[in-house]
Every structure is written in C-alpha cells, then in structure tokens.
Image (cartoon, rainbow, N blue to C red):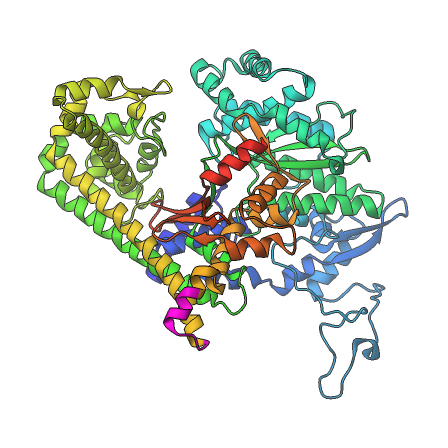
Amino acid sequence: MIKNLNEILKEWAYRVDNGQPNPKNSAHLYHLSEILIEYKWPFEVIEELLQNLTEQDSEREKIMKKVIKYKNKDGEDKEISVGGALKQGEEHPAYKQAKQMTDTGDKPKGDKVDEPSDFERGTDQNKGVDPDYTRDKKPKKKKSDYEPDFDSSPEEIANKLGGGEFKETNNENAVKQISSNRQNIFDNKVSGKGGGETSVQEEIASISREMAQQYPNDSQEEHETRVSKYVTDNYGDTKFGSNEKTMNKLIKKSCSGLSVMKKIKNNKNQKYAEEQPKGFPLNLTYTQDGTQTVQNLLITKLKNAETEEEKEHYKNQLRKFQEMATSSTGVEGDGDTAVVFMDDDGRLRVVHSSNKQTLSDQFSNATVLSAARAVNDSVVGDAEPNAINDVIESSVEDAVEFNKTYTKGVRNIIDENEEHFDNINPLLTKISAGGLTGKAEFDKGSPKYLKNARKSKAVIKYIEDNGLDINNDEHVVKAAMKVAGTDGADGVSDAMVNSHNKMILKISKTTAGVRDKLQKLIDSGKSVEEAAEILSKRTVKGKPLFGGVLSTDEMIKIYNDKNLKKLEDESKTRGQSLQDAHDSSVTSLVELDINSYIEQGMSEEEARKKYENEAGEHERTYTRSFMKRMHFDKYINGDVDDDKVIEIGNIALTPKDFRECLGTLTEWDGEGDLMSHVEKTMRIKPGTQSLMFVNSKGEEQELAEDTWRTAGDQPKIAGRLNKDLRKCLAGKA
C-alpha cells in the first residue's frame, strides 16, 4: 500500500477543488476514501486511517480554538478565539493573552473558570472524578468532527462548515457576488456540482425563480418566454448564452420557478416577507463561490445577532446549509441551487433545491464506502452491518477484477491488430470528440472523456516520449490506444491513472450501439446500406443518434469492423459480470435473514416462508440505508419540510409530496411510524434491482431501484425512483 503513497497524494491533490488536500476538511477526506478504494486498500484500514486523521488534534490546535474574553478600546466586553487574536496581530487587545496561552499552554492570569466542585462532579473514591459530568447529570454528547462550535470565531466556524476563507458579508455584498457568480457560469469560468451545461441549467432554474418573483401571474409559456429574453438580454454574448439552440433546450428543462415560489410563499412556516431587501430573494447555483457567499452571509448574520432567539435561528440555518450545500459531513449534500429570502421576522432563510431534468434522473450516487456508512447508521435490531458490508465489499472486489480482466482483454485485442487501430484512428477520434453520450444514446455528445484522457499520466508520458502534441485530439486517442490496459493503468475510471481506459470503454459502447441498431434493421429485411441510411437520419425529439457525428458510410464501416466488435464484446462481458455481482449480493442479503431465522430455531421451510411475508432485519437495514442515501428518511420525518424543494423540469415537489406518496403506495394507515412501516413492507424484487411493495390487491407497486453503475474502478450505486412512485409524484405536481 505504501509504495503507491506518492501517486495517491498526487491524485488527491488533483481531485480537491484547490489542489491542496486538507486532512481537516471532511470533503477532502471523502475524496481520499474514494482514491484508497480504487487502490484496493482494505475497508477496515481506510476507516482507521480516516478516523485517525479526523481525531488528531494537537494540543496547540486545541488551545487555538479556546475563547478568551477581553475589553476593546471602548471598554466593551468582547470574545475572540486564541487563533483569531494571534491572526489580528500585536495591536489587538487580546494578543498578549493569546500569546501567553500558546507559549505556555496555561490560561491567562485573571481568567476565572467556573468549575464544579469535586462533590458536584460526582467524585468517587474508587472511580475518581467523572469526566463526563455535567450539572444536569446528563452525559456529554461527543460532537462530530465536522460540527462547528458556534461560539468560536467566524473563521473557525467557516472551516468546519464547508471550508474556505471567511469574509464579512452583508446583503449588498452578497447580491454583487451572486451576480458575478451567474456571469461566470454563463462564461463557463466556474461550475456547480453537475459541471458545464448542467451548471447553466441549474442557473436557469435560479433565473426562473427570479422571474417568478417579479411576474407571479405569468402562464408557463409566458414565463419561459420571459426567462429566454432575460438570458438573451443579459448573457447573449457569453459562451453558453450565445447558443440559442442549447438555451432553448435548457429553458424547457429548467423553468420550475412559478411552482417553486408558489410553494415557498404558501408554506406558513417559512414566513416569506412580502417586502424583500433590494436584490432579494437571492437565487444561486452552488458553485464554490456561490456556496462561499451564502456561508459567509449566514455566519455574518449569526455574529451580528442581538438576541438568543436570533442566534438560534442562524445556527439552525447554518446546520441545514452544512448538511445540504457542502460535503463537510462526509456525505455529499443534495442541494444544487438555493433561494435566500427575508422572512417576516427580518431574518434570512435558505431553501435548498435539488435540480433534476426528469423524474427518471438519478437521485442518489453512492460509493461503496459511503453506502457502507449508510448501512452502519441504519442497523435494525440484531442485524449484522459488517455482514451486509461484506456482501457489498465482496461484490466490489469482484468488480475491480472484472475491470482488470476487461482492460487486459482490450490490450490483447489492440496488440494483435495494432496497424488496424492506427488506420481507424480518425473515426475513433471523431466519436471521442462528439459522439460519446450520457445515459441516453440520443443525448448530445460530450467531449469530457477525451478531455479526461488528455490528463492521463500514461497518455502524457507516451505523447512526450514519441514527440506528439497533447492538444491534438488524434494524438491523444492514438496514445490512449497504445497504453490501454498497461501495468499500473488497468482500471476504468475518470481518475488520472485510468481515464484513457474509460474513454475506450465509452467508444466501444457507442460502436456497439450503432451495430445493435443496424442489426435490428437488417434482421427486418434491410440491407446494410439501407439500414445505415435510415439510422443516420433517425432522431428522438429532434436529437440524432450519438450526437449526429456519424455518417452513413461511417456506420457501415463500424458494422463491418470485426476488431471493433471484439472490443465491444469485452465491454458487454464486463457489464454482464457487474450485473451478476449485484444479483449475487441481493441473494446473499436474503440468505442472511433466512440463516438468522434458522439460528432462532426455525426450519429452512419456516424461515423462507417468514421471509416471504415480512422483511427481515438485514433486508430492513439495507432498505433503511437506501432511504438514507435517497434522503427519504428526512422527507419522511419532516426534518427538511421548510428547507427543501425538489425541482424537476418545470415542476416543483416538496418533501411532504414524497412522504404522502410513500405512505399511499405502501398502504400506510396513518398509525405508528411511517419509516418503520416502509422498512417492513418495501421489499427487494427477486431477480431485479427494484424495491417494491405488494398491495392488498396483490399488485406490485414499484417504488425505487438501486442500480450499480460502472463508474470508476468500483461500481457506484445509483438510486432512482421507479415507475409507480414517479407516477404518484407527477400527480402531486
């Protein structure tokens, strides 16, 4: 493991936003955990390392966080952290006190601490002083490493929340910064969580809410026209705004503002003020700068709060912000955009939004490590989380081996047909530059995989060694083919070490898609030429196949290329192996509950019958962890009712909508706990990746699915809504 340490550190620096990994930043630790998984470190070792990194606070660091009292030049009582005072310099009234504490580790003279007596602490002759004593005799709750001390300095609060530099920010500053953030998104200088075009789509959702605030009585058609005009008038000369076709497409997918603002204003708990400050409500995308602006604004409001009630309000806003807008808790926040508005009490509130194009989009994307954490936090009864995680880990290890087998197969095929692949390099480059699509073959092609391959260490080395040009697409594709599956680069991911393999996999999926569609037409009686002519003109909702980059002749060339078919077969074998791994893990999960029943004294027949009627503790644990990853737990318990909306196309949904649909579809009678009810009744559908409920009529209600994606050197577990839940939610909208 240690021999790869330098590579791991380089990869870690590559993945964090500022290129400077910080072991105290939970978001950075999240990236580190993913890298260590890719390098096949054992999970127990990873967990131990991460725990050590988060717990290793030196004595000096602890002292730096302590709060000391002082009087300012006007004689007013003030507080500041030791670190904050030192940062201010010798002119600060508390500097000498802070310096003494860091030099000696002692408290400054005159700093009286209200300590309980030994009697109050609960001194016992045998046990000594109880370290967990508090005056109300309740044990102290250990704070999570990411939980801020709201009585500390603004800088320290910012570091715990989401990182970044704290700058005092008022309403006027925030309006200017968010305006600049929007300009940078349209200029493609910054991006949100989705990146590129997705960030623009999210920003259009923000513009839609802004227009809805100003013109609430518009029809949906009028609203979309108004958003389009706003974009043209203000950002028509930008990289994205100048592309009329792209803008029209994104506006159709992103104009939910009328619905969102109506839901916010109708929620009495949100107390939306009729009169808003100039430039408010703020509507923004969570880019790095956008996130920082909201964080700094809320911290500033907290520090300037005059009453305990006001302080508590902003503490709660900051907790929700950390949970939904950042990754500092170790779990990716599910907020993509936000609305910041003034309430009737004159206080700022933030409503966070998840932005999806359709109800079929992915709602959760977990790594195996984050899925394991969700399992550990979701144990039901006597279920053994380690056993469940062993099932997941075993499948992951298999998947890593599948990737190795795949890349070695690719290497052998290319070596045996090297001259041929050199000859078709222009076609492969054309596909890489514009024909690699996302989840749908009729999506616009993305050059992202070619861009990532350009950063591959093996590709860079080959290009340097052979006098090629890294900025030449054909040279990059040629280099990728030459180094695919070589030692040290035998995985499949977007990481620097394996990104060229990922591009080749995507190329194979594209050519396989062309081949399969041509074959269907040929099987129906068409010639190859006729089939290619039909396919080259085929569109879905105006979108051509694979970005429209392939001509009739090129499709025929792909169909007749036996060597390309060999690469495609390797890709299909890999995909099937991953599906088999998932099916095996589901079977193993079932067996855990059945074996548990047998250990309780049941026969195997009795155990299987009991399993058929009601989910066992292991399956319930898995279901609960799934709901946690999908954020259903928060929607069900009402924890985010006043803090969250889900924007989907031109509609908006609330946590309450999800809660009601889950209750209706699982025939909850309103008695007891909905979460517990769903856990018991939502079952894994045998032979599938679906979670379903069988109603009183014997009808299957398909609620959600856990799909294993082939992203990275281990699969990612993508959670989606299934058809019956989608139908119910569409009705709510």
Residue 91 in view in this figure: no
Residue at the (70%, 54%) spot, across then down: 149
Find residue 417 and report its horizontal and vertical position in percent.
Answer: 9, 38
Residue 198 in view in this figure: yes
Find residue 345 and report its horizontal and vertical position in percent.
Answer: 82, 35
Q: Residue furthest bottom?
A: 126
Q: What stretch of residues is rendered in magenta?
A: 600-609
Find residue 211 and report its horizontal and vertical position in percent.
Answer: 64, 19
Q: Main secondary structure of the magenta part?
A: helix
Q: Is residue 485 left or right of residue 237?
A: left
Question: Which residue occupies the foreground of this view, 586 or 271?
Answer: 586
Quadrant of the image for the C terminus? top right
Give the quadrant of residue 105.
bottom right
150, above or below 660, in the image:
below
Find residue 682 and report its horizontal and vertical position in percent.
Answer: 49, 52
Residue at the (53%, 37%) spot, across then down: 728
